[in-house]
Image (tube, rainbow, N blue to C red):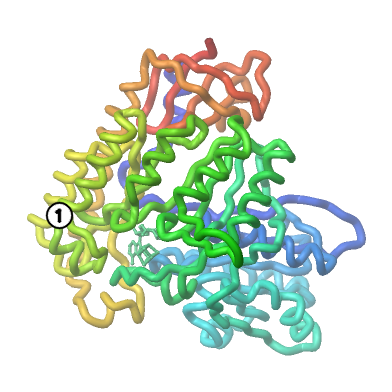
Amino acid sequence: MAELIKDLEILDNTEEQTADYRVSAEENIPGQKKLYIETYGCQMNFSDSEIVMAVMQQNGYSSTSNMDSADLIFLNTCSIRENAEQKVRSRLDRLHALKKKNPELKIGVLGCMAERLKAKLMEEEKIVDLVVGPDAYRDLPNLLGEVDEGHKAINVFLSREETYGDIEPVRLNSNGITAFISITRGCDNMCSFCVVPYTRGRERSRDAESILNEAKDLFAKGFRDVTLLGQNVDSYKWQPEQGERVSFAQLLERVALIHPDLRVRFTTSHPKDMVDEVLNTMAKYENICKNIHLPAQSGNSEVLDRMNRTYDREWYLGRIASIKRILGDDCSITTDTIVGFCGETEEEHRDTLSLMEAVKYDYAYMFAYSERPNTPAAKKLKDDVSEEIKKRRLKEIIELQGLHSFERNKLSIGQVHRVLIEGYSKKSEDYLQGRNSHNKVVVFPKENYQKGQYVDVLVTECTQGTLIGKTV
Ligand code: SAM
Ligand code: SF4
């Protein structure tokens, strides 16, 4: 068991956490052109790649997981931090060799980097044939037509309406149990550090009926866990032609009512918009998972003001108090934190550490500030915290979070958690893994259980990142 615990340890305490890219699935349909998609960045991008694959399948392409055999390669990119863009640049360098071997190979850059850099990307990266922003995926077949005629093609038009609501996503590398459903696109908040409003455009909500239909369809196909996605889910609103406006809490309730065996999760909640109505709805339905991702970004009110987050430390702590009041301790809370934002003093940094102590997050995504060109912070503030200090502060918060994650996980020892099985544990086929309502990975001996089943697991041990137990 000690070895298993060592193998399962997932938190790296020294480096900034970076998300890997994900690769499209192998379909292997003879006679069809093959599309390979690599997706970088957030869940929203991953969900977009599933839309892209749907558009391309309708146009005669099948999905491949092997870039060497692809006719077309898409990199669906992220711009959130500089290192996310660097990863794509070095990937493009490596694609040179493939293109040399197969001059017919076409390469497209999609997503946030395409939107941010536009035609400049094609000038800088000669092997790129097409550049397509996040709102232009319906145009992909036309753009490929231009490429086939020997031209380079670009569409980075940002829409005020596009939600791809009518497109049924093709699930990529799916475990058949969990799926993402986009409910909003874009963002209207102007956090001064963030590139998202410029790369993904204005916020718009998707038709509630199309969301419900997608969730029902997933349930009918055997999926048992859906995550509703948006940059700021609490600002979801849909006005049908007839009838009343649908708020996020109402949408959540309607998805939860599809079936008690369908688990519902959502992300991300913005502290300024998270209302008690959502918390009350969560409390009412057992199948709405008890986990709230409520990014604080900083624990200091002046820093939050410079970040233009439009709340302060007291407001944030008030929201945490509401979660505890309405959901008790039966709710995990996670956050995003940035260290070394413009002008951050040692004292301001200590406020972030003290906020972490006050909340005791179950998990946190932690980042060093990375200046993004043309954001309000880049235009008006000075990126004046040295890399060395950013690194040290990041290390401090990662270490503290490690202690808190472990402390929080230890509270589960001796408790029985309902777990939806998602597949084999990463390291051993003798063990299965799934997640509990708190979105924590739980590992237990396989016995005769199957993917997609719910089981009750008595937690007997834990690490910072994983609960370990046996079924009861
Ligand atoms: N919409 C979500 C919200 O408001 O919390 C988050 C969206 S963003 C894709 C994910 C996280 O990346 C942010 O919460 C923030 O912590 C981090 N992030 C965004 N811009 C950043 C930057 N310029 N440097 C470092 N981290 C950044
Ligand atoms: Fe970026 Fe702020 Fe919008 Fe989140 S809420 S996507 S951090 S601008």
Can you name the residue that lies furthest to the left here?
A: 347
Whether residue 93 can be seen here? no
Residue corresponding to mark 1? 349
Judge from the rendering whether residue 352 lies leftward or rightward of residue 183; answer left or right. left
Image check: 157 left or right of 69? left
**Direction right: furthest residue:** 31
Q: Residue lying furthest front in this view?
A: 243
Q: Disc 1, ligand 1: is the CB inside 8 Å? A: no
Q: Looking at the image, which residue is at 41% across and 55% down?
A: 234
Please provide percent x and percent y for residue 183. Answer: 54, 57
- Could you say where residue 138 lies in the image, as x and y percent from the top left? 69, 73
Q: Is residue 192 above or below residue 17?
A: below
Q: Is residue 11 left or right of residue 355?
A: right
View quadrant of ligand 2:
bottom left
Q: Residue at x 12, y 50 (%)?
A: 350
- Mark 1 is surrounded, within 10 Å at the Cα level, by few (under 14), some (14 to 19) or many (20 or more) other residues, namely many
Residue 69 percent location from the top left of the image: 78, 60
Q: Quick check: 390 above or below 395?
A: below
Q: Quadrant of residue 123?
A: bottom right
- The residue shown at (38%, 39%) is 280
What amino acid type should be assigned to the residue bearing mark 1? His
Q: Residue at x 27, y 35 (%)?
A: 324
Q: Secondary structure at mark 1?
A: helix
Q: Is residue 138 above or below residue 351?
A: below
